[in-house]
Amino acid sequence: MKILVCVKQVPDTNEVKIDPVKGTLIRDGVPSILNPDDANALEAALQLKDKDETVQVAVLTMGPPQATYMLRECLAMGADEAYLLSDRAFGGADTCATSTTIAAGIKKVTGVDVIFAGRQAIDGDTAQVGPQVAQRLGVPVVTYVQDIQMGDGKVTVQRQMEDGYEVIEVKTPCLLTCVKELNDPRYMSVGAIVDAYKKEITVWNHTDVELDPADCGLNASPTQVFRSFTPPQKGKGEMLSGTVSEMAGALVGKLVEKHLV
Amino acid sequence: MAVVVIKEKCKGCTKCVKSCPFTAITMEEKKAVIGGACTGCGQCVDACPFGAIEKTDDGKEAADLSAYHGVWVFAEQREGKLMQVAIELLGEGRKLAESVGCELCAVLCGSGVENLAGELFEYGADKVYYADAPELKQYTTDAYTKAIYEAITTYKPEIVLLGATHIGRDLGPCLAVKCNTGLTADCTKLEINPETKGIMQTRPAFGGNLMATIVCPNHRPQMSTVRPGVMEKAERQTGRSGELVKLSVNFAENDIRTKVLEVVKSAKEMVSLTDATVIVSGGMGLGKPEGFDLLKQLADKLGGTIASSRAAVDAGWIDHAYQVGQTGTTVKPKIYFACGISGAIQHAAGMQDSGLIVAINTNENAPIFDIADIGIVGDLYKVIPAIIEELDKLPEK
């Protein structure tokens, strides 16, 4: 069985700071990381490989050439194959166009039985590309997966809901998007890091995945960014002073004044 | 809308390189070059002191969009009850419909839930499109996508709004691909461009560090998801009615490729953070899971509920259902107490629209004080009991 895991290299948004004076993003020193939910998706695939050594794990991403660093990390965690879809023509894609490119890439990888992806990426938080890839491939999708039991020609999963979960059975091939409750991703091992550099990363452009440049990237994106701005900073509020009981008294006084209690 | 560098004007100052949130700009021979990671966000256009970067229209012929009319709201129901977010979307949808000058419709899927149509009319729907089939009793991606996709192709709405619930965020992307249109996730503001009559969708990106306004100029319908608790609920007008349009849906054997074997509700009550008027929220500053007991005392006193930051959830102190923020719930209570929460932007994104924010933190430099209305520097284990004591002194109502 071959499991293909869709991964994305993202800036660690926890490390992004706003310049308090200019109100702009400070990008310097913000590390690029494997998207956290994607790490859970990869871990789920690797756990299946741990149990059954005939399982093959492939990782695939779309991005600039620097994304190979993240793919090496995936190989060092235990993935067997890595694919990078990289082309100027793929740039500027919204989720709709991204899903076209990723689906075209997956079609070129031979023998894929099931596809895992993260629920959403921390740079956009849209949670759209996973289900959209499934639609383009014509396979069923289950999102928010928190447990996976592989069966013969089918998978039984738990789909997280706001107030519990659903147990869902789905035939393979299918696409599952994974949440962090699924597992704890492993670390790379030293030996595997060395091995990861011996493995080849396949890089494909639009011709390799048989896409017309008009069908990918900015050209094929229905949505466009009209403008972007840093959110307006609210003015600093009032800091209370005095002893603890004085501050508590002042606070409650204000709540009464505003008719909030 | 692509971003281009006018080579003649570029002085090679690299300001644009630093301004780019996506590290898409590099310098080649002392001129800026826009790379493949460009999303067309336009930050560099503003950053360039020499006017050397421009946003250009891609000059595409405008598609014929005139056949599309009306604002649709996905009326999500579970077990025969309308989700609150559907009522919020009707409130927002009404404003959009008025700006466009079109009707507001709800699309309802289920089995034997026709009674909900009356409720939707009372909350402002002019029309309710209703798909009734046993296969639609419970949500499945395939069944709901098919029913609503067929309705969209038949009746051609220009705008479709969905709640960003675990169902809406599953259904929306599938519908958008089938309709070959754009979908903007988790919008916090929707407005109509008075000139184009197109929708302008503002959403946080980069974990809330950047806001982006997204348009969908050449495809219809324009689709957005909106998180629960973000928009104002529609007011109910008792006795208001509208037109019920029944959709015919038929499912073939292989149309629905997933089977729901079991539905498990967690033993705990569904935490209703979005409806709470007072929220007492705790973070790493609590130091231990038992800290939430103290927060609960204050919350009970004020008729509110407790909540938490992501850090406290990750530490295993409290269930994910209580999490406020970018990856949790968006809340807008009248009073929000942030106790021992540093106030990372991801947390702020989920609570900064609260009526009054009270921050209690030992670190006077914590970013939470930048968004708080009232700040108290101190140990929450001393401050909160003191607040409870003060509240006890108030005369009974």
Image (spheres, coloured by chain):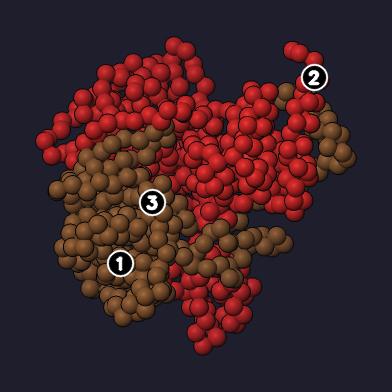
Chain colours: A brown, B red
Q: Is residue A68 left or right of residue A238?
A: left
Residue B112 spot, x, y in % from top left: 27, 18
- Provide the residue designation for mark 1: A79
User: Which residue appears at 60% of the width and 32% of the height?
Assistant: B306
Question: Based on the displayed image, in which of its 4 quarters is residue A168 positioned?
Answer: top left
Marks 3, 2 in one chain: no
Q: Nearer the viewer, residue B124 or A3?
A: A3
Residue B67 in sight here: no
Q: Earlier in the sequence, mark 1 or mark 3?
A: 1
Locate the N terminus of chain A and report the quarter of the image it occupies: bottom left
Q: Nearer the viewer, residue B288 or B100?
A: B288
Question: Based on the displayed image, in which of its 4 quarters is residue B359 positioned?
Answer: top right
Mark 3: amino acid: Asn
Residue A258 spot, x, y in % from top left: 76, 27
Between the C-alphas of marks 1 and 2, the distance is 63 Å
Q: Nearer the viewer, residue A247 or B254?
A: A247
- Provide the residue designation for mark 3: A183
Query: Which chain does tag 2 point to?
Result: B
Mark 1: amino acid: Ala
Residue B310 spot, x, y in % from top left: 55, 46
Q: Nearer the viewer, residue A102 or A74?
A: A74
Mark 2: amino acid: Leu
Residue B303 spot, x, y in % from top left: 64, 22
Between the C-alphas of marks 3 and 2, the distance is 49 Å
Q: Which mark is residue B394?
A: 2
Secondary structure of the residue carrying numbered label 1: loop
User: Which residue appears at 67% of the width and 24% of the height?
Assistant: B302
